[in-house]
Amino acid sequence: MSKSLFITGTGTDVGKTYVTGLVIKKLVESGERAAYYKAAMSGNERKDDGTLLAGDALSVKKVSGIAQPVEEMCPYLYENAYSPHLAARIEGEPVELSVVKDGFRKVCEQYEYVTVEGSGGILCPIRYDEKKIMLEDVIRALALSCLLVADAGLGTINSVVLTAEYMRARGIPLVGMIFNRFHPGDVMEEDNIRMCEELTGLKTLACVQEGDRALRMDADVLRGLYR
């Protein structure tokens, strides 16, 4: 039976995709059959034949080294680098939770550990027309616990605490935090992490530095986060 984990971030461009790739790489290097999944992916480039390249999925494949076909990784691709609800309003093909769940189930049938990446931050609208789907609805539909990725720099205390408190108020389980773009010895960044732990009660599971090719985290601890 497969185990899975959802990776969300405090916002856009905090490095969720890169960290997700490192997480999956750690699992693979510890001998696990690991896979990637994302409900909706925006900001993708078009190939010459007009089809879209799944940018985040390709980035995860490059970092992690997994052989999983890109076609399995994401059911909804959009060209515009907008929230999925707006990209779909412009391009068509709005997200259906039944399709997301079916794709997730198929991946879970083939792999032992499935890491699901979110779009933007926890309040990202996935669909907002006659149907309203927020990112948290995807998390609930897939029955996942969450790992929070944040930038280690200025402003992260506010974004981490607000995100964690919102998720707790909504009953979304959080298993810990990973800080990206961390600079060892930086007084502010080290204090940011300490304050985030103090104010949220969450544990920092790893810190990722620019250019890291491996996650500084015990493989058994990482496996234990998956449910």
Image (tube, rainbow, N blue to C red):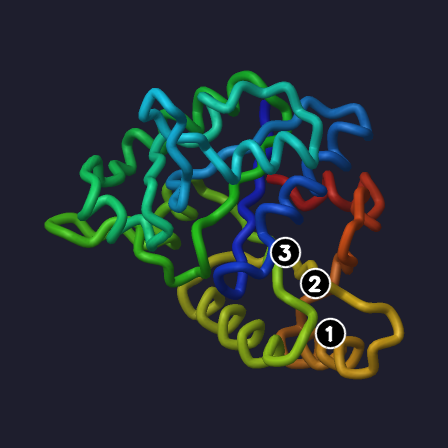
Q: Which residue is mark 2?
A: 179
Task: Residue at 77%, 60% (x, y): give it.
Answer: 207
Picture layout, residue 47 above or below residue 198: above
Decide if residue 174 is on the left or right side of residue 52. Answer: right
Secondary element under disc 2, as helix, strand or loop, is: strand
Does residue 132 lie above or below 58 as drawn? below
- At x 25% / y 36%, what residue is drawn? 96
Q: Mark 1 falls on what kind of element?
A: helix
C-alpha distance separating marks 3 and 2? 14 Å
Q: Nearer the viewer, residue 68 or 98?
A: 68
**Residue at 73% from the left image edge and 39% from the top image edge:** 223
Q: Badges 1 and 2: C-beta atoms under 8 Å apart?
A: yes
Q: Earlier in the sequence, mark 3 or mark 1?
A: 3
Quadrant where the C terminus is found in the figure? top right
Q: Nearer the viewer, residue 69 or 137?
A: 69
Q: Position of residue 163 (x, y in %)?
A: 50, 69
x and y, in percent, of residue 49 in the image: 34, 20
Question: Residue shown at 64%/47% (left/top)?
Answer: 18
> Mark 2 or mark 1, which is nearer the start of the sequence?
2
Front: mark 3 or 1: 1
How far apart marks 1 and 2 lie (CA) works out to: 8 Å
Q: Position of residue 85 (x, y in %)?
A: 26, 51
Q: Position of residue 89 (x, y in %)?
A: 18, 48
Q: Name the mark on residue 52.
A: none
Quadrant of the rendering where the N terminus is positioned:
top right
Check disc 1 and give the amino acid type: Ile
From this view, report whether residue 90 is shown above or below residue 11.
Answer: above
* Residue that label 3 marks: 175
Residue 77: image quadrant is top left
* Residue on which disc 1 sits: 193
